[in-house]
Image (cartoon, coloured by chain):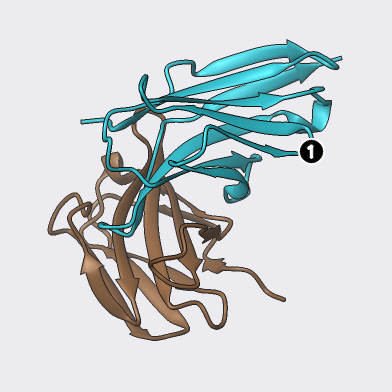
Chain colours: A brown, B cyan
Amino acid sequence: DAGVIQSPRHEVTEMGQEVTLRCKPISGHNSLFWYRQTMMRGLELLIYFNNNVPIDDSGMPEDRFSAKMPNASFSTLKIQPSEPRDSAVYFCASSAGLADNEQFFGPGTRLTVL
Amino acid sequence: DQQVKQNSPSLSVQEGRISILNCDYTNSMFDYFLWYKKYPAEGPTFLISISSIKDKNEDGRFTVFLNKSAKHLSLHIVPSQPGDSAVYFCAAYTGTASKLTFGTGTRLQVTL
C-alpha cells in the first residue's frame, strides 16, 4: 500500500523563480497537511485541508505561498516568487480525518533557493 | 510562540542504556500527545501517543509519561539500540483545532 508521495524530492532554484511542490495523499485519507521543517522552528504547519477544502492557512508565512487541493488525490504548494529564506524541507502528510490525530508523512521535498 | 518545546537539541546514549527525551508544552487544551521518529531523508513516522487523561503508555521498549500539572511529557527508550538513532519530535493535538503542533526535535545518537 503506497504511502504519501511527494515530488520532486529535491528542488534547486534561483531567487525569484516559481516553485511548485506536489503531494499525493494516502488513498481514502480525507485530511492533508503541508509542513515546513527548519532548524530553528522544527516542523511548522503551513496549511491543511479536509475533504479538499482549506481549513486553516494561518501558518502560511506570506502571500508568496499558496496551496491548492483540486481533488482528493492531489495537492500543490506553490511559492512565487521564491526567496533564499524559503530553503527548507517541505513535508506533506495525510490522515483519515481531522479527528484522527495520527498523520502519515511523505518523504519530503528539500528546497534550495539560491 | 512555541507551544511545544524540546529544549535538548541532541542526546547521546550508550547502547543498552535508557534514553529519556523530554518535551514541555504551554497549552492546557491539548488532548493527545504523540512522538514521531525521523530518519535522514525520510518523513517522520508515528511512534507512540498518549491521551491527556492518562499518565503512562507503554509499547515494547517505548514508554511515554505525561505529567499534566507540570505540562511535561517524556519518552523513555529501554534498552536503547543503534537503530534508535534518529530525530524525535514531540507533537500535541487539539480536537478543537484538529491539528498537530510539533516541537523542534531532539537528535538521539545511540553509541556502541
- Left/right placement of residue A106 relative to residue A1 reads left
Work out whether residue B4 or residue A11 is closer to the camera in this orientation and state it: B4
Chain letter belonging to callout 1: B
Q: Residue at x 26, y 57 (%)?
A: B97
Percent from the top left, x then y, of residue B50? Answer: 53, 42
Residue shown at 82%/22% (left/top)? B79
Residue A18 falls in image quadrant: bottom left
Q: Disc 1 residue type?
A: Gly
Residue A26 position by quadrant: bottom right
Position of residue A18 relative to residue B5, above or below, is below
Residue that numbered label 1 is attached to: B60
Vertical arrangement, residue B9 with respect to residue B85, above or below: above
Q: Which residue, as the protein is rendered here, is positioned at the far bottom?
A: A71
Residue A64 pos. (x, y %): 17, 58
The N terminus of chain A sits in image quarter: bottom right
Residue B101 figure quarter: top left
Residue visible at 50% across and 77% down? A29
Give the residue displayed 47% in from the left and 71% down from the top: A23
> How would you rate the neighbour count of disc 1 (Cα within 10 Å): few for under 14, some for 14-19, many for 20 or more?
few
Q: Can the viewer see residue A113 in this picture? A: no
Secondary structure of residue under mark 1: loop
Visible residue check, residue A68: yes
Farthest front residue?
Answer: B53
Task: Decide if residue B38 is on the left or right side of residue A72.
Answer: right
- Judging depth in this view, the residue of A3 and B55 nearest the camera is B55
Q: Where is residue B58 drawn, in percent x and y?
A: 69, 37
